Image (tube, helix red, strand yellow):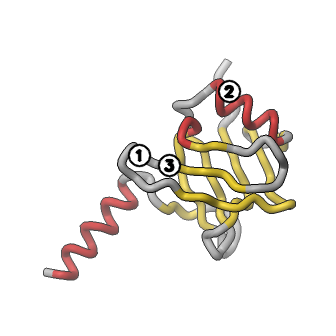
Amino acid sequence: MTRKFIASLLFGMFAAGGLQAATGPGNVGQEVTAGNITIPVDDRGTISVKNCSSCPERVLGLLPTTTYEIGDVLVRRETMRAELLRRPNQVMLLQLTPDFKHVARLRISPAAH
């Protein structure tokens, strides 16, 4: 019974957009709606992620090496912030470091024309 319960929880987590495999060895990614992310004004600091209204907010650190990408193009943090505000319902990828505490990469698909 306990194994079924744990399996159900894991299935629910993956189905709800939980942790997904990302590119790169040892890295883990999470798909998140752009409107549920708060990126700081400064290059350093933390971002806040909230996957649903009843989910707890997660705070993840930014690194000096954190990259921001729109499609395959590297952009500055302010460009990414503007794009997230413009497309709050867009699903994007947060690639985390192996310790799950920092963001290595934020990627959003290019805008549809």
Question: Disc 1 marks which amino acid?
Answer: Cys
Query: Is 104 on the left or on the right of 75, as rendered?
Result: left
Q: Report helix, strand or loop for mark 3.
A: loop
Question: At x 45% / y 58%, what residue is drawn?
Answer: 18
Question: At x 21% / y 73%, what residue is drawn?
Answer: 5
Q: Residues within 10 Å of mark 1 (few under 14, many from 20)?
A: few
Q: Are marks 1 and 3 in contact (CB under 8 Å)?
A: yes
Question: Disc 2 marks which amino acid?
Answer: Ala
Where residue 112 appears, as percent x and y from the top left, is 64, 23
Where residue 92 appears, as percent x and y from the top left, is 60, 43
| Residue sitting nearer the eye, 29 or 59 | 59
Q: Which residue is mark 2?
A: 111
| Residue sitting nearer the eye, 88 or 109 | 88
Mark 3 or mark 2, which is nearer the start of the sequence?
A: 3
Where residue 106 appears, as percent x and y from the top left, is 70, 49
Q: Are marks 1 and 2 in contact (CB under 8 Å)?
A: no
Q: Residues within 10 Å of mark 2 (few under 14, many from 20)?
A: few
Q: Which residue is mark 3?
A: 50
Note whether 89 is above or below 96 in the view shown.
above
Q: Residue at the far top: name it.
A: 113
Q: Quadrant of residue 59?
A: bottom right
Q: How many marks?
A: 3
Q: Quadrant of residue 86?
A: top right
Disc sitting over residue 52 in the figure: 1
Q: Are marks 2 and 3 in contact (CB under 8 Å)?
A: no
